[in-house]
Image (spheres, rainbow, N blue to C red):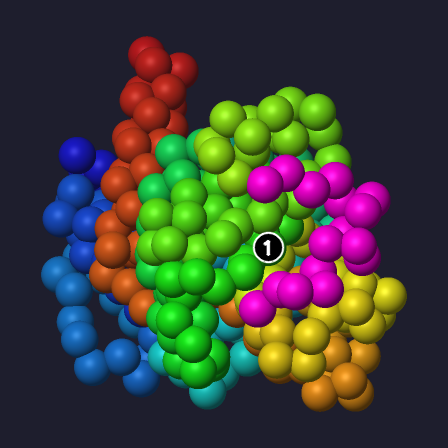
Amino acid sequence: MLTGMKIAVIGGDARQLEIVRKLTEQNALLSLIGFEQLDHAFTGAAKEKVDGVDFSKIDAIIIPVKGTTLDGQVDTIFSNEEVHLTEELLKKTPPHCVVYSGISNAYLNSITKNANRSLIQLFQRDDVAILNSIPTVEGTIMMAIQHTDTTIHGSNIIVLGLGRVGMSVARTFHALGAKVKVAANTSEHLARITEMGLTPVHLNHLKEEVGNIDICINTIPHLVVTSAVIEKMPLHTLIIDLASKPGGTDFQYAEKRGIKALLAPSLPGIVAPKTAGNILADVLSQLLHEELQKGKEQSE
């Protein structure tokens, strides 16, 4: 139980509602910022404006999985209000206050460091990333079906990256009967791709391997699907980019060449928000409980 713990939940999508539900069931006291248009009410959770929250009593701050923009704005789909997470706001919190986000950026790293507050990136955890890859894969399958006129079975597909998402994507499309190549740049990953019964491709040779590709699925958050790579793709190729914004694809060149390229970094929140929210809620509940116990031990 999280009895007595005061948590500010700032913005977010439908996944955040599952987090709120779980934490109120654990008897935490929640301040919901950026939720005034939400019809549903939760016992133990109060909808508030930023200025109405006493951050000196807040034990934890939970922001959306995508974190903030580079100027500190937090996504609030249940509100028309612009909400910003600032260094000044963090400095109002107690020293033990922890900020929880899915991912981070230079801005969020900077303000938490300057305010001397801990930042936990949930998507850096293996358990979250692996479980979150399940709705990501299902969403990718949905997009592949919607945006092509052929079956996945028998299609030539290349997956870029063999991280936690890339491995799940490659394995699932292979199981559906696709001919799957996987591109990576380390000997360990290339060996693993071979062990999985898939075709390994070194990223340095990507241009030579996309001439017959029907679907390219990128999971690498760096520019890897360059204009030089796109130039070698058939015009019917579909690019699905699962990497965090801005993705790893030259979208401007893809459009210029007439190749459909889709950026889809938040598929779990779109195709399965309840499941994705429950994954995050379970981990957050565990982490918050650990922080609560730590605080109790330090006060004894």
Disc 1 element: strand
Quadrant of res 210? bottom right
Quadrant of res 36? bottom left
Disc 1: CA contacts within 10 A as few (<14), some (14-19) or many (>=20): many
- Any part of residue 139 in sight: yes
**Above-or-below relation of 113 to 268:** above
Q: Which amino acid does label 1 sit on?
A: Ile
The residue beneath circle 1 is: 158
Membership of 203 in magenta stretch: yes
Q: Quadrant of the N terminus?
A: top left
Quadrant of res 89? bottom right
Q: Which of 127 and 251 is in front in this view?
A: 251
* Residue at figure coordinates x 55%, y 79% from the top left: 82
* Residue at figure coordinates x 48%, y 47% from the top left: 170
The residue at the far right in this view is: 228
Membership of 18 in magenta stretch: no
**Above-or-below relation of 300 to 252:** above
* Residue at figure coordinates x 83%, y 44% from the top left: 204
Left or right placement of residue 20 versus residue 180 in this view: left
Bounds of the magenta segment? 199-214
* Residue at figure coordinates x 34%, y 60% from the top left: 138
Left or right placement of residue 90 versus residue 128 in this view: right
Q: Where is residue 155 in the image (x, y as percent from the top left)?
A: 48, 64
